Amino acid sequence: MAAFVRGIQGRPLGKILDSVGTVSLELVASVTISFHQSDRHLMANALSDPRYALSDGASTVPSSLPRTVAARIRVVSDFDVIEAEWRALEADCVMSVYHCFDWLKNWHAHVGRHECADLALVVGEIDGATAFILPLGIWRSGPLRVASWLGGKLNNYNFGLWRADVYTTLAPDTLRKSLKDVAAQARIDSFELHNIPEIWSGLRSPFLGLAHTPSPSASYVMDLESDFDTLYGKARSSKSRRSLRKKYDRLQEAGHVDIVHAITPEQARIAADATIELRNERALEAGIPSVFANSGVADLIRDTAISAAGQAEPVLDTHYLAVDGIVRATYVGGVKNGRYSCSLNSFRDDDLTAMSPGDLLLTEVIRNCCERGLTQLDLGIGEMRYKTAWCEADPLIDCFVPVTLAGRFHATARSWVQTAKRLIKGNPVLWQMVLRLRKLRAKRG
């Protein structure tokens, strides 16, 4: 199996699974063997479930998407060529902030051009009008060309830009045929499409009509209200609210507290620089790669935050809490169609950590969003206490769509990897083992 995966991926499976703390294929194998019997049954059921089969046949997922139409597909390799078309669709469509033109063009300029082999910006036309845009890139996996969403791990939600009438009525066959047309034009062996929400703003995803598997982790989302105090009273217990007030009082005793929504370039720079510093420190302590290990990511966050500061719907919207001028916590997100999506946060781990500056800042971020008239907020992927205190789980799916025979082997292996990640994260014993291994690796340097 190790040789098989190395052959189709061009790198060891252990490195692929580094994000869940494993450091070698042998370690993954030993951890997997330690699954309880019920976990082995769950793995077998997940891999044999026809919903997750990597076939081109009709999906077994019940569908209310009856509109089978012909979509004309164009694949473009230059942002500038479709900028006007993209921005026109972006003005009124179903999408997340992660697929805004400005965000992805900046991401590609700072990060993507070093990572992906080619751009594959997909434009789908129905009845002569732009119906959807799928912002894809092509990565090399050994000899294979694999298409994935642009934005990489910085994106918590991926599904493209869609006219609302198309998003809610497109038949699976039309989407399946569209991907085949994309593959033919861009010489793609397989599609690997992560973190697609099952439901977005109450609308069912057309990607549910494709073969798919649950993502390893859910995201977390909440509905906002115009009156923050009413929302706060519903979401948090009186005991929690009293505790947070006391912590804020103690924080004020420690020094002058500033809670800032960055609306000037200088404020955005302070928030971005602090986020980069604190995330790097936290990653080193936890024994995991920092999202800023690639210097291009730091430049992307800093430059985009500064340029977006003060906009009505900034693709990066930053907040920070400082005590005596020292930033203690940050939140970095973006706003689109009334929804704030948090992509990064950070906090300083020192003598003031007990005062929960991160929780205090999050409460003020939510208050700010309510006051601005936003209707939803999400806190991104991965279960954490501060997320579940406010939000509900928002299920995501991954679609692996093979095109060539070699692509089928690749898609099958990658589906297994994602299933293994999901089972490990869903098993408290195994997940604690992963966290301990991370810390042990950090101590060993």
Image (cartoon, rainbow, N blue to C red):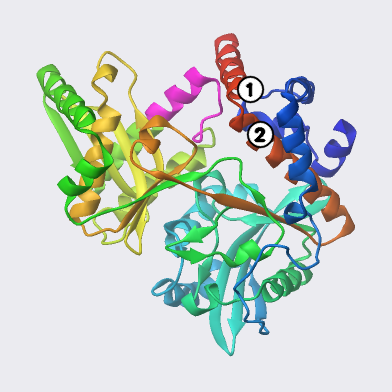
- Give the residues drawn in magenta, as a range: 277-292
- Look at the numbered disc 2 and give the secondary structure of its residue: helix
Where 224 falls versus 285 (above or below)? below
Instruction: Say which residue appears at 61% left-offset and 18% top-offset.
Output: 433
Where 423 falls versus 287 (above or below)? below
Instruction: Say which residue appears at 33% left-offset and 40% top-offset.
Output: 390
Residue 335 locus on image (x, y percent): 34, 57
Closer to the camera, 270 or 172? Answer: 172
Closer to the camera, 407 or 417? Answer: 417
User: Circle 2 is placed at which residue position?
Assistant: 423
Q: Residues within 10 Å of mark 1 (few under 14, many from 20)?
A: some
Residue 398 locus on image (x, y percent): 64, 51
The answer to whether residue 205 is visible is yes
Q: Are marks 1 and 2 in contact (CB under 8 Å)?
A: yes
Residue 354 locus on image (x, y percent): 27, 17
Left/right of residue 3 with respect to residue 259 in the rendered view: right
Where the N terminus falls, by quadrant?
Answer: top right
Closer to the camera, 400 or 270? Answer: 400
Whole-number angstrom distance, CA of label 1 to CA of label 2 = 9 Å
Q: How many marks?
A: 2
Residue 170 locus on image (x, y percent): 60, 76
Q: Amino acid at mark 1?
A: Leu
Q: Earlier in the sequence, mark 1 or mark 2?
A: 2
Farthest residue to the top: give it.
444
User: Circle 1 is placed at which residue position?
Assistant: 430
Is 112 contained in the magenta span? no
Q: Amino acid at mark 2?
A: Leu
- Look at the numbered disc 1 and give the secondary structure of its residue: helix
Where the C terminus falls, by quadrant?
Answer: top right
Name the main secondary structure of what is drawn in magenta.
Answer: helix
Q: Residues within 10 Å of mark 2 (few under 14, many from 20)?
A: many
